[in-house]
Amino acid sequence: MAAGAQPNSFTDRAFFEALVQNGSDAIIIIDTDDRIRFANDVIKKMFGYDPEELVGESLTTIMPERFQDAHRAAIERYIETGERTLDWSGIELPAEHRDGHEVQVSITFEEYEYGGQNVFSGIMRDVTGRKERERKLEQQNEQLERFASVVSHDLRSPLQMAKATLAVAKATDDEEALEELDELLDRMDELVDDVLELATQGQTVDETEQVSLEAVASDAWNVAGHGDIAFESDDVTLEADPERLQTLFENLFPNAREHGGAESIWVEATHDGFAVNDDGGGLGHVDREQLFDHGYTESESGTGIGLNIVRTVAQGTAGGSRPARATRAVPDSRSTR
C-alpha cells in the first residue's frame, strides 16, 4: 500500500460481515450432517432464536414437524446421488418460530466447499405478508365468481319469470298471476339481500372482542326469531366479532324454522366454540358434503346462499392469520336455505 493510502473499507472482512449480519434476510449454513454451523442475527427477528442457540442443532429445529422426515430424506439422497428432489431457488415453505407459529419463507440454497468440507447455505426471506395478500385476493376472486353466478342465473331467472307473469296478469287480470308475481319479487328481494350480506361477510375478521354468547344470540333472535318457537342459550364469554356472530345466528335461526319445522332452538357452548341445535325434522336426504356450498339447496324457495354465509363467517380470521375463536358453528339446522 502506498504511503498515506487509506484501507478500502468496502473490501474489509468487517464490511462483509456487517452485510451478512444486518441484511433483511436470514442466513443459515449447514454441513452434510444437517447441522447448523452459522446463523446470522436476522434469525432472532424471524424465528425467535439467538443465533448461538441454533449452532450445532439440526435445521429441522426451525421446521414444522410434518416436513422434517422429507427434509432428512432429501438431504441424504442428495449426498448419496447428487440428485435434487426440490428446487433450490426461491422455494416457498412454512418454517416454525420458536413459539410454535408458522412463518412463510422463501428459501434459496447454495452449495460450496469451505475448509475442505461441503456446506450448504440457506438464504430465507419472510413472505408471510405477501402470502396473506395473495390469500385475500383469492378470496375476493372467489366472491366475484359467486356474485357473477347469482347475477347471471339466480337473479335473471326469476326476473324473466316475473316479466312473463306480469304480461299474463295484464292480459287476463288474473289475480293468481299477480300473487305469483308478488312471490317472485319477494324472492328477488331476498336474493339481493343475501348477495349484499355475502359481500360484507366475506371480508376478513380483523378484530375480535370478548362477547356474551347469550347476549349476541338473543339480539339475533329479536331480529330473526319467531314468537311461536322456544329459544334458549348458554351464557358464556367468547372471543369473536359480535356483528359477524349475530349475522351467523340470523341466518341459522330462520333456516331451522322455515325449512326444518323446528319448535325449539338452543345455542350451547362447546369446548372449542358453540353449537346451534334445533328439534326440527332433520336433514333428510340433504348432501352433507355440499350443505354449506354456495348455491346448494333442496328447497324450491331457497337461495342456496344462507348457509354459505354461515360458513364464510365461521371461517373468518382474526388479525389476518389466526382463526377467530367462537365463530365456529355446528348447526343442527334441519334443511338448507
Image (spheres, helix red, strand yellow):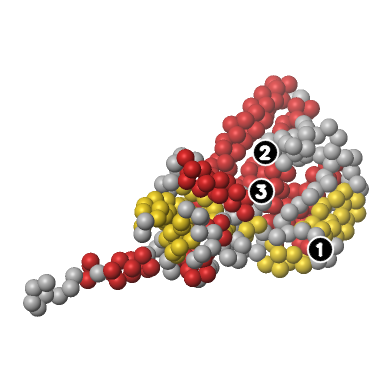
Q: Residues within 10 Å of mark 3 (few under 14, many from 20)?
A: some
In space, the residues marked 1 and 3 are separated at their CA atoms by: 22 Å
Where residue 160 sits in the image (x, y, percent)? 64, 27
Q: Residues within 10 Å of mark 1 (few under 14, many from 20)?
A: some
Taking the spot 66% from the left edge, 48% from the top edge, the residue there is: 312
Q: Secondary structure at mark 3?
A: helix
Amino acid type of the residue that numbered disc 1 sits on in the rendered structure: Glu
Q: Is residue 205 visible?
A: no
In space, the residues marked 1 and 2 are separated at their CA atoms by: 29 Å
Amino acid type of the residue that numbered disc 3 sits on in the rendered structure: Thr
Report which residue position mark 2 lands on. 294
Return the residue nearer the eye: 312 or 63: 63
**Number of callouts:** 3
Query: Mark 1 or mark 3, which has the lower sequence index?
Result: 1
Query: The N terminus is located in which quarter?
Result: bottom left
Return the residue nearer the eye: 79 or 122: 79
Q: Secondary structure at mark 2?
A: loop
Report which residue position mark 1 lands on. 214
